């Protein structure tokens, strides 16, 4: 049986008497789990989670309801009186009809995240074909074929309604059996709740971007660094960050001091509970339905075998921990071997709080909750930045390949140029210490170091071209069709719009870091999932080479809380126009020091992880700070589509409209 069918009874929404009685009527189902009749009510109270609606025909009502997560009553946005919204269970190959009625005093909408469907059904007001939103008191009917299977979710695409509770899971059962087996099936939906009005949250961030950052470095940590590193190293490190006017702990805009992190709508104090029998295989469908929070998920004492990413089956990977960007989903299989409880522990990236659940064979058994990991620090590799002064102009002229900070101090190690040629001339564009060129002469645009260029030897890692030095000193260029993650990227090209007060940093040395688990997870003693681990369970769906490449820079001004793509916010940007049937390589360069989960509506993103034969398909891709990442898109869906960062308070600016025709 699927225990996600059980309605919830406390902790999030004031539920009706009818739903409570329904829950008691389900008590007999617990007898088969060996709980005993005396545990029925206790089990019902612990087995909280979104109600499940199955079939092809659905009536959903968006409304408001009293909620209380923190001891202070608030008003949440609900679907059919539930927060999270009910789990929708579909079947691949069916046609679903969803009549959505809006009882809010404002326009609303529902976007079916990760679902491949016609543009008119995508649910983004003003972008989806002919869709202007669902006005107060009106009903909109969504209808589309279900062409996929797996774990997905749905949420509002209007205002800040997602933050106030309008989100829920979608489970699509496959037409053919899954390539793995399991005995139990649970949704684990993670989210963040704030008692504040989201418009107030956004206003505070606009006035002071670090308003909610309570984990800045302390005097005690300074003393510890002095003891460990010595005065000189500590002084140089702290001085550099100070001159850049950046924080080593700028991970999340809103943190656990304001957020309450939820698991299936339950606070850490209550926790969600899933039951199992020893030896069973349990499928956990993790969904990050939060507005702003990255979660790092582990179950101490249990290995997790990841079998699906963003709803798509992958070659199984066994790990101890994985990071979930906002809007990502991961399905894992766990196999508890003992009659003991286990804690599902999801700490936020800023280490300011956690969501939790419990897997247990007996409702009376609980497990210890681990300590939150120490607050990490951003490293130099998370930067790759050419910092600018407050006016948005360059910091000053380069000095020997080093960057001059606003104070006039030179900061080494970011974009190194003017390398010495054999003839004494300089070779611009390279990045490390001076290099000897055997033949002399200028060679612009190179981006690599330590290349052996003696007769006929190959220079590896130079963009998409392979360079061979001929006997007469000329350079022969041979075009390669390599996966771009196989080599270090060439020089970064910044658009003119990236220079100005709307952009306060630019990445000059972004790297593919597919095997990097990210800040806070490096070298933590646990096996952590990375994008390099992801391989499609079947061969790549479209083997064509890309027809063209589109490079998009994720940009912003942290101090002014301005977010953009290529330095231009959505309201000022021209749409991206793609041709139906073409194959595009999208390359993201993150010019900021924050992770951005980028979501393309209506089409799959085939993540380039190194093996072109088994590219994993995703709908949301994390772009790490100071890094680049690429994927291929088959443009097979006509109409208007949204393309944006899924951090809710970034979305207003870091957004593009895509028009496919």
Image: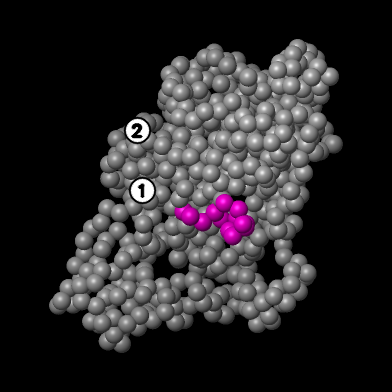
Secondary element under disc 2, as helix, strand or loop, is: loop
Does residue 522 belong to the magenta stretch?
yes
Q: Quick one: quadrant of the C terminus?
A: top left
Dot 2: few (<14), some (14–19), or many (≥20) neighbours within 10 Å?
Answer: some
Residue closest to the far bottom: 424
* Left or right: residue 634 compared with residue 20: left
Q: Residue at x 67, y 77 (%)?
A: 229
- Tell me the number on the disc at residue 151: none
Q: Quick one: quadrant of the N terminus?
A: top right
Q: Which residues are magenta?
A: 514-527
Secondary element under disc 1, as helix, strand or loop, is: loop
Q: Nearer the viewer, mark 2 or mark 1?
A: 1
Asked if residue 448 is positioned above or below residue 129 in the image, the reply reads: below
Label 2 to label 1, Cα distance in Å?
23 Å
Going from the N terminus, do you reach mark 2 or mark 1 first? 1
Task: Give the image quarter of residue 236.
Answer: bottom right
Residue 170, image x, y percentages: 56, 27
Q: Residue at x 53, y 30 (%)?
A: 151
Residue 342, image x, y percentages: 71, 39
- Is residue 83 at all visible to an observer of this figure? no
- Front in this rendered view, residue 293 or 560: 293
Dot 1: few (<14), some (14–19), or many (≥20) neighbours within 10 Å?
Answer: some
Task: Give the image quarter of residue 346.
Answer: top right
Residue 387, image x, y percentages: 53, 68
Residue 509, image x, y percentages: 45, 65
* Residue underneath mark 2: 636
Q: Residue at x 30, y 45 (%)?
A: 546
* Residue underneath mark 1: 611
* Left or right: residue 521 compared with residue 204: left
| Dominant SS type (magenta) | loop
Q: Residue at x 68, y 45 (%)?
A: 300
């Amino acid at each position: 049986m699927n225990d996600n069918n059980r309605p919830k009874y406390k902790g999030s929404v004031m539920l009706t008497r009818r739903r409570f009685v329904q829950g008691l009527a389900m008590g007999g189902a617990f007898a088969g789990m060996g709980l005993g009749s005396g545990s029925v009510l206790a089990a019902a109270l612990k087995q909280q989670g979104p109600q499940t609606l199955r079939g092809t025909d659905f009536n959903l009502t968006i409304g408001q309801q009293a909620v209380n997560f923190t001891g202070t009553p608030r008003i949440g946005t609900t679907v059919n009186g539930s927060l999270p919204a009910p789990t929708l269970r579909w079947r691949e190959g069916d046609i679903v009809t969803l009549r959505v009625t809006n009882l809010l005093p404002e326009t609303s909408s529902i976007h079916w995240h990760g679902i491949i469907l016609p543009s008119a059904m995508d649910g983004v007001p003003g972008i989806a074909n002919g869709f202007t939103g669902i006005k107060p008191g009106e009903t909109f009917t969504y209808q589309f074929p279900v062409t996929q299977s797996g774990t997905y979710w749905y949420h509002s695409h209007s205002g800040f309604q997602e933050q106030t509770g309008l989100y829920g899971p979608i489970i699509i059962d496959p037409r053919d059996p899954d390539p793995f087996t399991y005995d139990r099936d649970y949704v684990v939906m993670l989210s963040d709740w704030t008692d504040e009005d989201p418009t107030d949250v956004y206003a505070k961030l606009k006035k002071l971007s670090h308003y909610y950052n309570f984990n800045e470095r302390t005097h005690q940590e300074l003393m510890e660094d002095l003891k460990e590193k010595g005065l000189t190293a500590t002084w140089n490190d702290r001085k550099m960050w100070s001159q850049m006017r950046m924080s080593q702990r700028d991970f999340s805009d809103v943190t656990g001091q304001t957020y309450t992190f939820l698991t299936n709508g339950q606070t850490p104090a209550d926790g969600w509970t899933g039951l199992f029998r020893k030896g069973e295989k349990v499928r956990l469908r993790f969904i990050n339905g939060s507005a702003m929070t990255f979660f790092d998920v582990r179950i101490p004492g249990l290995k997790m075998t990841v079998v699906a990413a963003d709803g798509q089956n992958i070659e199984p990977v066994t790990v101890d921990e994985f990071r979930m960007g906002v809007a990502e989903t991961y399905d894992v299989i766990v196999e508890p071997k003992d009659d003991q409880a286990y804690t599902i522990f999801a700490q936020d990236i800023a280490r300011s709080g956690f969501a939790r659940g419990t897997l247990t064979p007996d409702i009376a058994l609980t497990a210890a909750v681990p300590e939150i990991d120490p607050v990490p620090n951003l490293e130099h590799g998370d930067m790759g930045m050419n910092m600018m002064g407050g006016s948005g102009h360059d910091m000053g002229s380069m000095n020997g390949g080093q960057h001059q900070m606003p104070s006039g101090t030179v900061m080494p190690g970011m974009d190194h140029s003017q390398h010495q040629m054999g003839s004494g001339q300089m070779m611009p564009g390279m990045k490390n210490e001076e290099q000897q060129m055997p033949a002399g002469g200028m060679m612009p645009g190179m981006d690599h170091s330590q290349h052996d260029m003696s007769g006929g030897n190959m220079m590896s890692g130079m963009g998409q071209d392979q360079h061979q030095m001929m006997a007469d000193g000329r350079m022969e260029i041979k075009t390669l069709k390599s996966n771009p993650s196989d080599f270090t990227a060439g020089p970064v090209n910044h658009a003119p719009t990236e220079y100005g007060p709307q952009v306060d940093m630019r990445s000059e040395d972004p790297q593919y870091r597919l095997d990097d688990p990210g800040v806070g997870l490096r070298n933590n003693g646990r096996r952590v999932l990375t994008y390099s681990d992801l391989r499609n369970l079947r061969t790549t769906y479209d083997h064509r080479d890309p027809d063209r490449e589109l490079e998009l820079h994720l940009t912003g001004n942290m101090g002014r809380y301005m977010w953009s793509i290529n330095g231009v916010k959505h309201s000022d940007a021209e749409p991206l126009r793609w041709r139906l049937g073409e194959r595009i390589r999208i390359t993201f360069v993150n010019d900021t020091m924050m992770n951005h989960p980028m979501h393309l509506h209506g089409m799959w993103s085939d993540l380039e992880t190194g093996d072109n034969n088994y590219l994993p398909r995703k709908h949301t891709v994390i772009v790490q700070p100071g890094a680049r990442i690429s994927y291929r898109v088959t443009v097979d869906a006509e109409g208007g589509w949204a393309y944006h960062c899924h951090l809710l308070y970034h979305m207003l600016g870091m957004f593009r409209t895509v028009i496919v025709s």
